[in-house]
Image (spheres, rainbow, N blue to C red):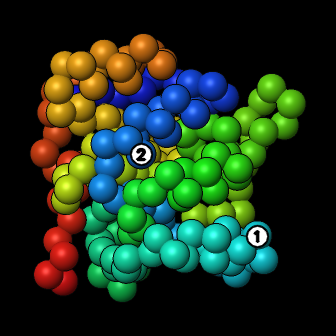
């Protein structure tokens, strides 16, 4: 398991998306906890752009690196991984944490869903928490591990089964 040291941006981010979309079956984005963001025109238009790839909304107390009490479930939007969806994401973001850019500095989270995650089959491949600058990768081979590690600085850490989300399509 890999833990990202610092944000992947620009060309490296585009290359990371190439890897993720090449191998992934699904990707997800989490609803913004900021109601003004989730109701903004930018947010709604972004989701409308991805609507042809939408599969379902998952409401859960545990998502990648999130644990919330009953009654405060996270809403996670699940999408089919597709090159056209990749193009939409690339047109809105230039970094893995989906942050706004102010010159060379990163600013706030954009008024879009956050926490981009990728799944191969039903298992988490890459997970992020935008506002906490967390990104873990669960590479399924040494070749993929090398490919991912060539894009940014990563730490190899002990595998954490609690955070490798497994999708359940029976819910």
Q: Nearer the viewer, residue 139 or 40?
A: 139
Mark 2 or mark 1, earlier in chain: 2
Pointer 1: residues within 10 angstroms few (<14), some, or many (20+)?
A: some
Q: Secondary structure at mark 2?
A: helix
Q: Is residue 17 visible?
A: yes
For residue 121, above or below residue 154: below
46 left or right, relative to 114: right
For residue 64, above or below residue 47: above
Q: Is residue 74 visible?
A: no
Q: Residue furthest front?
A: 83
Task: Estimate the x, y position of residue 7 in percent, counting from the top left.
Answer: 56, 29
Q: Which residue is mark 1?
A: 42
23 left or right, relative to 16: left
Q: Residue at x 20, y 56 (%)?
A: 121
Task: Estimate the x, y position of residue 154 in percent, counting from the top left.
Answer: 38, 19
Number of numbered discs on residues = 2
For residue 18, above or below residue 117: above
Q: Which label sits on residue 65?
A: none
164 left or right, relative to 105: left
112 left or right, relative to 59: right
Task: Estimate the x, y position of residue 26 in percent, counting from the top left.
Answer: 34, 59
Pointer 2: residues within 10 angstroms few (<14), some, or many (20+)?
A: many
Q: Residue at x 45, y 57 (%)?
A: 82
Q: Secondary structure at mark 1?
A: helix
Quadrant where the image shows the N terminus: top left
Q: Residue at x 19, y 59 (%)?
A: 122
Q: Residue at x 78, y 30 (%)?
A: 105
| Cα distance in 3D space between marks 2 and 1 | 24 Å
Task: Estimate the x, y position of residue 9 in percent, counting from the top left.
Answer: 62, 29
Q: Which label sits on residue 21?
A: 2
């Amino acid at each position: 398991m890999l833990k990202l040291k610092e944000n992947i941006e620009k060309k490296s981010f585009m290359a990371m998306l190439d890897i993720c979309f090449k191998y992934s079956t699904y990707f997800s984005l989490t609803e913004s906890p900021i109601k003004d963001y989730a109701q903004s025109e930018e947010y709604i238009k972004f989701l409308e752009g991805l609507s042809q790839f939408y599969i379902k909304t998952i409401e859960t107390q545990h998502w990648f690196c999130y644990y919330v009490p009953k009654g405060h479930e996270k809403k996670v939007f699940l999408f089919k991984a597709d090159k056209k969806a990749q193009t939409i994401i690339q047109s809105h973001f230039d970094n893995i944490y989906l942050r706004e850019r102010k010159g060379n500095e990163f600013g706030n989270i954009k008024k879009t869903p956050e926490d981009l995650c990728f799944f191969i089959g039903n298992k988490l491949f890459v997970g992020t928490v935008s506002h906490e600058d967390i990104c873990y990768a669960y590479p399924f081979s040494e070749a993929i591990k090398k490919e991912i590690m060539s894009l940014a600085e990563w730490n190899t850490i002990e595998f954490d089964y609690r955070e490798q989300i497994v999708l359940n399509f029976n819910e």
